[in-house]
Image (cartoon, helix red, strand yellow):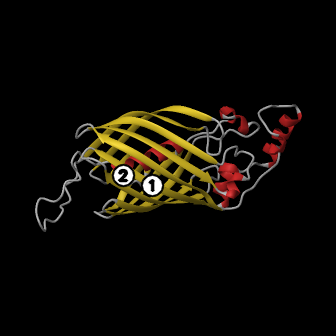
Amino acid sequence: MRVGFPLLLLCSITAPLLGQEPGSNAPPAGPGAEPREPAPPTFTLTLGAGVFAGPKYPGSDEMRVLPLPIIGVDYKNRVFLGASSSGVGAGVGVNLIRSRHVTLTAGLGGSESRPEDRADALAGMSDRRLGFAAVSGINYQAGPLSAGFTFSAGLRDNAGLTGTGTLGLTLPVTRRTFLSLGGNITVANQDAMFFEYGITPTEAGRRASLIATGDSRLQPGDGVAYSPDGGIRDMGGTASLAYMLSRKWSLFGFGGVTRLSDEAARSSLVRRRTNWTTGAGITVAL
């Protein structure tokens, strides 16, 4: 199950930048000085706005541009709404463990709907409603490097189980500019693969009927049922750049690429195996 496709992409890009401040790449105060973990604020609110451009759904060859409202609420580094600053949660959740190097989260995420009329390749498919998932993740941070794993279990519509492993690197370019690079791989069980790329016999029949009537939205081979096996679903990478205007305001831009596995790409719903995304925005921490 994909937990909010544009939302998760944004979270994976901006989460490593949360908490950065101008000049945060400065060295310790003196020789042998031990870094000290500052006491977290009781309540942190991050608001922002941006724009997202990407495929209409993973595997689509049609693009869409969406406004991207950004909200993040954090209470004592324990309870969060939006993106967890560790990068392993999105939605509503709690940091079960929050130390200098390790964060373990659990929470509830959501997935966007997928109506049939969103893209031509979905003609004849059933509308997919909003979804919910139980999400848990662990992240390990060592200086500029991070590694994590997120597990998601769909809570309705037989959305299945997915797991995503991530590697990240965040580096200061200047005292106000930060570069973040990341890579990820997602595995999914058979239910989750079918949820995204499967075609039931009933849907295949509707698609075949549309093809027979000359519907230009579908291609000749699109009227076939498909049930993918579980396994690797996709791999991808992201890059982002953030500029800290002040201690509260920041600008960011990002780009990402996702490559679907052979099993996913065999579905007639997939018109483009490699998808690109991009976007930009501004945030303020209150």
Query: Callout 2: 10 Å neighbours few (<14), some, many (20+)?
Result: many
In-image side of 286 versus 118 (left or right): left
Query: Callout 1: 10 Å neighbours few (<14), some, many (20+)?
Result: many
Whole-percent x, y for residue 145 in the image: 36, 61
Of callouts 2 and 1, which one flags the residue occurring earlier in the amino acid sequence?
2
Q: Quadrant of residue 147?
A: bottom left
* Residue 216 vertical placement versus 134 (above, below): above
* Residue 18 vertical placement versus 216 (above, below): below
In-image side of 266 versus 20 (left or right): right
Question: Label 1, on which residue?
Answer: 182
Whole-percent x, y for residue 34 in the image: 16, 65
In-image side of 232 versus 135 (left or right): right
- Label 2 sits on what residue type? Pro
Q: Quadrant of residue 212?
A: top right
> Which residue is rendered at x = 65% and y = 45% of the image?
59
Q: Nearer the viewer, mark 2 or mark 1?
A: 1
Q: Quadrant of residue 241?
A: top left
Question: Label 2, on which residue?
Answer: 16
SS for callout 2: helix
Q: Are marks 2 and 1 in contact (CB under 8 Å)?
A: yes
> Which residue is rendered at x = 53% and y = 51% of the image?
133
Q: Nearer the viewer, residue 264 or 255?
A: 255
- Label 1 sits on what residue type? Gly
